[in-house]
Amino acid sequence: MTSVLDRARDFLLRNGRLLERRLFEHHFEGASAEPVVRSLAAYQGRDGGFGSALEPDKRDPHSQPVDVQIAFEILDEVDAFDPLMAGRACDWLASIATPEGGLPFALPSVNASPHAVWWKVEGEQPPADINPTAAIVGLLRKHGIDHPWVGRGEAFCWSVVETSETEQFHDLMPMIAFLEHTTDRSRAQAALGVLAQRIPGLVELDADAVGYVKKPLDWAPTPASFCHRLFSTEVLGHHLAALEARQADDGGWPISWETVGPGPQLEYRGVMTVAALKTLKAYGAL
């Protein structure tokens, strides 16, 4: 019988972007991080930011804050957080930060290209958002990147984290990334304790639930994840089996939302396929 990895590899070779193919080679075939970084560099613009639909649900060729977050997450996962690449991105982030020091969720240029409805930007000066500011600041702190903007971004994050009662996954996960690496550890541990009490009530525990829901492995994609402590071994094992079972006949993993076209759908399925494989590997399920 063809293995989970073999089927996924075939899907990525047929349908995936070069970036996801390089990530697969790195995580599962022993390739170095260098080809991943070279592929990622194609998404970094002259302004230093990242764009060109690195996040496939918006086709904007210009730099966007969330694309910087994704780029930093990829550099982190392959242990190749390049200071020069990150420094150029920080220069761009500083140029688009609001007076409070935070970053908008998206910039107005996104409106001029096909995009999912949640990417639409109202107005010419969108406000700062904890998503993706917190995740970006957290990764920069983790890797010791010293840039004048980082302190401003950190101050903005604290102003939100300690007052927000959000129950949104895409706010809470960046907050956790920030709190895991921000410099004030005692303050961060107190805030993480508050989030640890809030999150269990937000998790979809039904492994067969459909739609845009967030299940235990979304919150804890690896045993090293902060939220891993919130779930029992039995719950995680059940969801790992369900995750493996969701591999489609073509070898890829499905997505649970409507994309802007068939090309972006395949691109995002490639992203989700690599993510699913990484989670299965992290838990020893491959």
Image: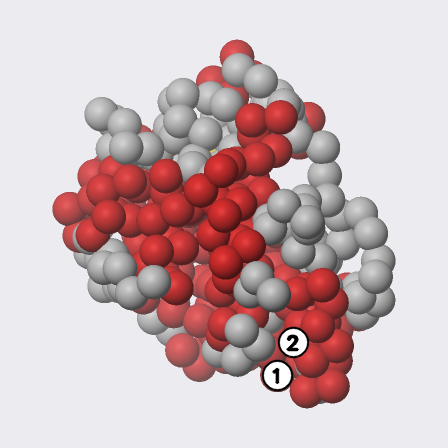
Residue 129 spot, x, y in % from top left: 54, 42
How many marks on residues? 2
Query: Label 2 vs label 1: CA separation?
Result: 9 Å
Q: Mark 2: which amino acid?
A: Ala
Query: Badge 2: few (under 14), some or many (20 or more) residues near its Cα, within 10 Å?
Result: some
Q: Residue furthest top?
A: 112
Label 1, secondary structure: give it.
helix
Query: Residue at left 34%, top 62%?
Result: 29
Name, please, the residue furthest toward the front. Answer: 1
Which residue is farthest bottom?
233
Front residue (pair 3, 195): 3
Question: Mark on residue 13?
Answer: none
Q: Is 89 situated left or right of 96 in this image?
A: left
Q: Nearer the viewer, residue 190 or 47?
A: 47
Q: Is residue 234 above or below residue 99?
A: below
> Which residue is nearer to you in this view: 159 or 122?
122
Q: Quadrant of the N terminus?
A: bottom right
The quarter of the displayed image where residue 25 is located: bottom left
**Residue underneath mark 1:** 229
The part of the image, by quadrant, that contains residue 114 is top right
Instruction: Estimate the x, y position of residue 59 in percent, counting from the top left.
Output: 50, 23
- For label 2, the residue is 196
- Residue drawn at (28%, 32%) of the image: 42
Does the rendering let one see residue 88?
yes
Residue 99 seen in the figure: no
Question: In this view of the protein, which residue sits in the foreground, 148 or 208?
Answer: 208
Image location (x, y in percent) of residue 84? 15, 46
Q: Are marks 2 and 1 in contact (CB under 8 Å)?
A: yes
Q: Amino acid at mark 1?
A: Arg
Position of residue 208 in the picture relative to residue 196 (left or right): right
Colour setting: secondary structure
